[in-house]
Amino acid sequence: MDEQPTFERDIERLYLAHNDWLKGWLRKRMPEAADADDLAQDTFARLLGSRRSVHDLQQPMAYLATIANSLLINRWRRQAIERAYLEALAARPEALEPSPEYRYLLIETLVELDALLHGLSPRIRQVFLLSQFDGLTYPQIAERLGLSIDQVQKAMGKAFALCYRHLYEQ
């Protein structure tokens, strides 16, 4: 008697059929083979976590490549944030250097903030960053960007609404 294919068996079949191909695809895009191997594992872990059926995939390699590419972009964005943070840290006096634990938490927060802000339009994101990180007033932002104060207020309202939803509606 044939058993119905289970989700785990389908993932295993997909893994056995395409893991080597996925690693090769990632190695063309990443300088370190070990990083490509890790990202391939992360791709299959994402599949396992999603619990979406892969039994009837028409183009399994395209599906895997899409997931892996998303993970790769996230990795590059995180690395860019870490580099920017480390550059800013290097400019500070050594006595002010935060602990490794604090640095890790700060980088995690910056990555989360980057992902959150990625959901905003470029103009709203720029208004928000000028206000919150550069400490500019709404009139200063309006002057710098050639906007009205009302446009700046509306942009900040949208940015704060997104932040609120992220914090309280998840």
Image (cartoon, helix red, strand yellow):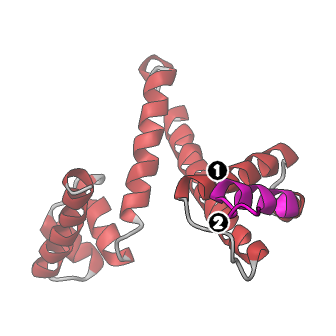
Side (left or right) of 11 relative to 91: right
Magenta span: chief secondary structure? helix
153 on left or right of 64: left
Q: How far across and down, in percent of the image, does residue 45 sit?
A: 64, 50
Crowdedness near tag 1: few (<14), some (14–19) or many (≥20) residues, C-alpha within 10 Å: few
The region drawn magenta spans 1-19
Nearer-N-terminus badge (2/1): 1
Q: Nearer the viewer, mark 2 or mark 1?
A: 1
Q: Which residue is mark 1?
A: 45
Residue holding disc 2: 67
Residue 76 visible, this angle: no
Query: Going 42% across and 36% down the picture, which residue do you hit?
Result: 106
Which residue is depicted at the point 72% across and 51% down? 39
Horizontal side of 40 relative to 141 (left or right) equals right
User: Looking at the picture, how far across and down is residue 125, in whole percent?
Assistant: 33, 68
Task: Verify whether residue 14 appears in magenta.
Answer: yes
Corner quadrant of residue 169: bottom left
Instruction: Residue at the far left: name it.
Output: 150
Q: Residue 12's x, y, as percent?
A: 77, 55
Say above or below: 87 vs 144.
Answer: above
Q: Name the secondary structure under disc 2.
A: helix
Q: Which amino acid type is marked by label 1?
A: Ala
Where residue 93 appears, x then y in whole percent? 47, 24
Disc 1 on helix, strand or loop? helix
| Quadrant of the image occupied by residue 160 | bottom left
Q: Do the residues bearing badges 2 and 1 touch, measured as CB atoms within 8 Å?
A: no
Would you say residue 157 sits in the magenta stretch?
A: no
